[in-house]
Amino acid sequence: MVRSAPIPGTSLNCLRQLLAEGVPVGVGNEDSVRRQWWAALATLQDDLLLSQPSLEGIWLAAPLPALYEPGLLQQLQGWVWAPSELGDLLPAASSLLPGTRGSSANALPSGGFQRLALAEEDGTDPLLLVITPTVQAALCLDGPPQARRLVVRFDPQVLSAALSLINERLQSSDPEAAQALRTALQGLGSLRSDEQLVLRFWPRMAERLAAIAPSVTLQPLVHGGHEAASKPFSSKAISSELALLEALTHEVRTPLATIRTLIRSLLKRGDLPAIARHRLEQIDGECSEQIDRFGLIFLAAELQRQPGSEDPLERDALARTDLSELLRQLEALWQRQLARRDLVLELQIEPGLPPVLSDPARLETMLGGLIDRFSRSLPSGSTVRLALQPAGAKLKLHLSHDLSPELRGEPGHQSDPGHHRELVGPVLSWNPATGSLQLSRQATQRLFERLGGRLTERNGSGLTVFFPVC
């Protein structure tokens, strides 16, 4: 059966607006609402859904699955509006998604989910509805930049209106899915309000939110409304790819943030064996490293979406930064990260260097990303050298490497760790030899430009970043 486009007024953006009716205007930025979203998801899944003695029900999400607990995915029926480009750009990943292997809407099994087509007017802000006999809730992010908000609704009237809009949408675009959803809802009975549920949700969410440490937050690449209209993409292909990256952002960050939160709660215990504490600290470090790594990737994608823009807030954020002290503070962290890949860091800083003009908060993460990008292709046993020295009216930060004595002269080991990188889209590069996905050279250069630096990269001679001296 051919699927038709959704009729006007039934887009997922209209659904978000319906859920947000009566909710105060948002005042948050993207950082704050994303942390709220992760805390709300964890609370809904761990404290409300998984605490039930038995589970049955349905869930609907966009732009990719919001639920990530295996117990929920196995027991609840799901429908997910996902970008059509998912299958084109990442066919291997698409084939691994439950419900993408020819499942029929009118024969949807318990567990897994069926994919639905995400339309251009749907937007890419996360959205989730969950309906079970005891837990009935809707979550979404909504609002323009700097006025973002998390919307959480438990009231039956709003949820009923939301389900009616979804049914109308599916009737026009996928009648089989509409029938399957109606059948599933009929088996769950009428919607009802549970005041105790609401009283449990908000305090637990606040506790989880307080436990999520601020870090580099993955920035959205697509916004509905005036933002999208005023800043169009440079091409349809780039638009599709960046929209997909934004959707995947949430699916990568959510479980990592949850894992890190749980680990940090365990590390507070005083009765942990030393080996268990060491392993948990390693996992915590790996989660933080990957969260920051993806943060840089998607910050670079946001810059790619606005290739000609100049952000005065970025320029105003530049300040006197003691780069020498910053490197010394981060040395131990980088040593631990490199040690996991059997690499060694050697830091060389000339004494008496002046401060530079940069943004110290973002520079810390960017430097970590630079070391990660430079070192991921190096063979075990290599030494990563980071040297800071004066260069006229600038400071020169140079990254180079030495192979271990055992590898020197062996065939198959290139002196340039980025020799075999291939571009994958506008902001990413890929090393086929290692499977490592990283920021492209151009994307890395643009990020450093926003931080007051200038990156140069030459095959065989490492990386160099120049910072203006204050």
Image (cartoon, rainbow, N blue to C red):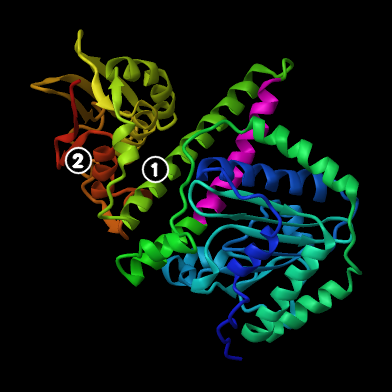
Quarter holding the N terminus? bottom right
Image quadrant in which you'd find residue 317: top left
Q: Label 2 vs label 1: CA separation?
A: 23 Å
Quarter holding the C terminus? top left
State the residue lying farthest toward the bottom.
Answer: 1
Q: Disc 2 or disc 1, which is closer to the eye?
A: 1
Instruction: Name the N-terminal-most of marks 2 and 1.
Output: 1
The image shows residue 328 at horizontal and vertical percentages of 34, 15
Let me know if residue 432 appears in the view.
Answer: no
In the rendered view, does 320 fall on the left or right side of 103?
left
Amino acid type of the residue that numbered disc 1 sits on in the rendered structure: Leu
Residue at 42 percent across and 41 percent down: it is 293
235 lies above or below 293: below
Tell me where the magenta segment starts and ends, as one range. 248-268
In the rendered view, does 396 fall on the left or right side of 383?
left
SS for tag 2?
Answer: loop
Q: Residues within 10 Å of mark 2 (few under 14, many from 20)?
A: some
Amino acid type of the residue that numbered disc 2 sits on in the rendered structure: Asp
The image shows residue 349 at horizontal and vertical percentages of 23, 15
Residue at 74 percent across and 16 percent down: it is 271
Dominant secondary structure of the magenta stretch? Answer: helix
The image shows residue 285 at horizontal and vertical percentages of 51, 30
* Depth order, front residue of 382/30: 30
Disc ID at residue 296: 1
The residue singled out by tag 2 in the image is: 416
In the rendered view, does 360 fall on the left or right side of 195?
left
